Image (tube, rainbow, N blue to C red):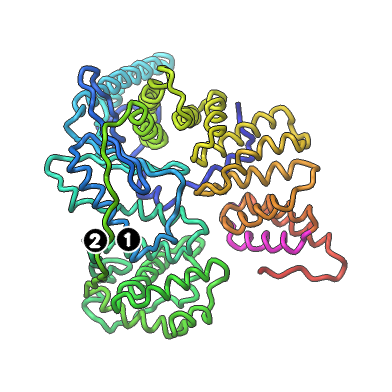
Amino acid sequence: MSLPSRFLFLTTVRLAMAALCLAPSGTLAQGEPMSDRVIELPPLLVEEPAKPLRWRHVEFPGLEMLSVVSDGETRAFLRRHHNQSEILQWILPTRFQGKSSVPDEYILFNENLSRAHSQEVMNSMMTAQRDAARRKQAREKAESGDHETGRGHGRGNPKIKFLPNLRLIDVDTTAVFVVVRDSDNLASDFTFSMDRIAYLLASRVPALPSWFMAGMLGLYERANFSDDQIAFRPAVWTTPAELTALKDNAEPLRTLLPMAELFAGRPRQNPPDARADRLWRAQCTLFLRWAIAEDKGSRREALWQFLDRLESEAPSEGLFQSYFNVGYADMRDILSDYLPEAVEQPVTLRAGKVSKPPAINLRDATPLEVARIRGDWERIQISYVRKAFPGVVDKYIEQARKTLRKPYDQGERDPRLLGLLGLLDLDAGDRSSATPFLEAAVNARVARPRLYYELSLNRYAALAEIAAGNALTREQIDAISAPILAAWDMPPQNPAACAVLADVWNRTTEEIPPDILDRLNRAAALFPQVEGLVLRVARLNLRRGDLDHAERQLRQTLTRLSDPRLKPAIEAELTRITSLRPSGRNSTPPH
């Protein structure tokens, strides 16, 4: 079953900053000759039937965990996780972090368990693939009449390296695999990775200003956490050469960006200007270091209140001055004077002791819990492996299906398990098989927003094939919309789901209910970067006769357009609005 082509670009945004942190080191297309290079893959958990692992289970605020390491190590990890979460709030309060109705999934694994057997399975698969590539190469040479030996091609297996620690992101949750070595001290070594901070920032709704996200990542990169303080190492500047020059001479001519340009967002030169981008990022970090860490953090509350206001209004010098007591020009001078100190001196932010962690109730995991958590981790690996080394993705799909199907084949019908089986079919490319599992999970009200979106999309795809351009009836619209509306308040809100809802109402002659249009207008305001959503919602406002609202939405989108393919459609709608206005009436300026 094929999806409507217009939805191909509406797949949920995959959090660009986090994706950069998780980018695989290399890819190898199917059919490409094997080589000796190293391919980094997620761990393949292959248990020996004669030696089943003893899994322990625990639920903790914000996460659910399986562990095969000692209870002491597991408790130490969770206490450290709690402390890190508490201390993180000093520089990134909870209200500025992304939320999800699905707990993070953690697996703590001992590197010595099943490692040899897993490597053996992978080596056998590599050998089979190498032999298949050689046979294909020989067949192609014979068919082309080329009798060259092809020396140097197809020799050897790629070397597989299993990544010891990995955090992978799905639409509504993250999964974390941590390999514990005998020498590890989880009570002191564990700290949140950069990609976790990037995910918390980028998944927050409403979206945080880009200058804050860039500055926070730069600030966190220089931070060391202990139980009651954060120590920031000296700041870095745009390039090592400029940093050295700055340290050698604290009084050179320093040209910082005007604060209005800093708050306007990442520079968009064409062609891109790498130096301008580096300066913008470095200055974002410098400003947050000054606002959060200096003077014992006395300006933090002003920064948080400033961010709160930016959710409802654009940054301005007057607004900035009301919280920081300086104007834009003076603020740039302050940062310029602060820069030599920032690159030379560390700074420490102290606070009281963190709260005591909640009780850690470890117990033996049930077979269903093992299948559900481990199987979901194996499912989430599929997308990563498909990009890193597609030649082995079938093995990962097979492993995830084996884990999730085992309790199902034994009669287990837990709704969360059924939902995961549906997501597995989707990630494996089989939408039709996924539908019954999705229906069962949604009917049971499983708290997993992606299930509801995918079910709506499946229903829409089926109707699109039947209706083929005909106007949708109210009954059809209700069937498609019902799952989306049922999950509307389950975080994280999915802009692609909002776009599906807007699209079905654009394909009918029925009048859109005011409450649905209100929801979509709020969604368009929350996700202005999802241009396809804004265009659809503007069309609904236009059809309703609200020309001013539609024009504001379209003009705002046009100023930040990232997909040039949508520009003609947006301009056509603006032209239509002009033609619909009474003669002589001026158009509405951008809000």
Disc 1 crowd, CA 10 A, few/some/many (<14, 14-19, 20+): some
Direction right: furthest residue: 583
Q: Residue at x 51, y 56 (%)?
A: 205
Tell me whether the residue at label 2 lies in contact with that at label 1, contact meaning CB atoms closer than 8 angstroms: yes
227 w.r.t. 254: above or below: above
Horizontal placement of 289 versus 502: left or right? left
| Disc 2 target residue | 225
Give the structural element (helix, strand or loop) at label 2.
Answer: strand
* Residue 239 marker: none
At a point 29% along the width and 23% down the height, the residue shown is: 126
Residue 306 vertical position relative to residue 55 in the rendered view, above or below: below
The span shown in magenta is 546-564
Residue placed furthest toward the left: 183
User: In this picture, is 460 found above or below 247?
Assistant: above
Q: At which x and y percent is residue 307?
A: 47, 69
Q: Main secondary structure of the magenta part?
A: helix
Amino acid bearing label 2: Phe
Element type where label 1 sits in the image:
helix
The quadrant holding residue 346 is bottom left
Q: Does the magenta stretch include residue 326?
A: no
Is residue 560 shown in magenta? yes
